[in-house]
Image (cartoon, helix red, strand yellow):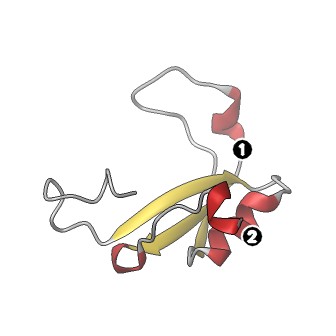
Amino acid sequence: MDRLYSDEFPNLQYLGTFVKSNFEGSMIKALRDKGWTLATLSEPSTPSNREEQEINSDFKWVFLNPVERIRKQSMLNDFQ
């Protein structure tokens, strides 16, 4: 996230990520633990700048995180 949030984008207010809506795993818990908020459900759409792929036909959860809450990514060594 530090790489994305820099002087190059001074008006950046949120970072966003998409997770397939049928995904069941620890990623959603990890996002929520890091302060990410479920914002909406993205409907399938046709990409305008690349070839159609199977993932484009999936619904996806959209999670957002305000830039002021950016934290360093946890590493395995942080828990030892």
Classify the position of the N terminus by image quarter: bottom left
78 relative to 6 in the view: left or right: right
**Which mark sits nearer the N-terminus, 1 or 2?**
2
**Closer mark to the observer between disc 1 and disc 2:** 2
Q: Residues within 10 Å of mark 1 (few under 14, many from 20)?
A: some
Instruction: Report how far apart the C-alphas of labels 1 and 2 lie in the structure.
Output: 20 Å
Dividing the picture into quarters, in which one does residue 14 lie? bottom left
Dot 1 amino acid type: Asp
Which residue has dot 1 on it?
58
Dot 2 amino acid type: Lys
Residue positioned 54% across, 35% down in the render: 46
Query: From what the image shows, is residue 40 above or below residue 50?
Result: below
Query: From what the image shows, is residue 8 above or below residue 79?
Result: above
Query: From what the image shows, is residue 8 above or below residue 69?
Result: above
Which label is found at residue 38?
Answer: none
Disc 2, SS: helix
58 relative to 6 in the view: left or right: right
Classify the position of the C terminus by image quarter: bottom right
Where residue 43 sits: x, y (%)?
63, 53
Dividing the picture into quarters, in which one does residue 79 lie? bottom right
Where residue 11 sits: x, y (%)?
18, 68
Q: Residues within 10 Å of mark 2 (few under 14, many from 20)?
A: few
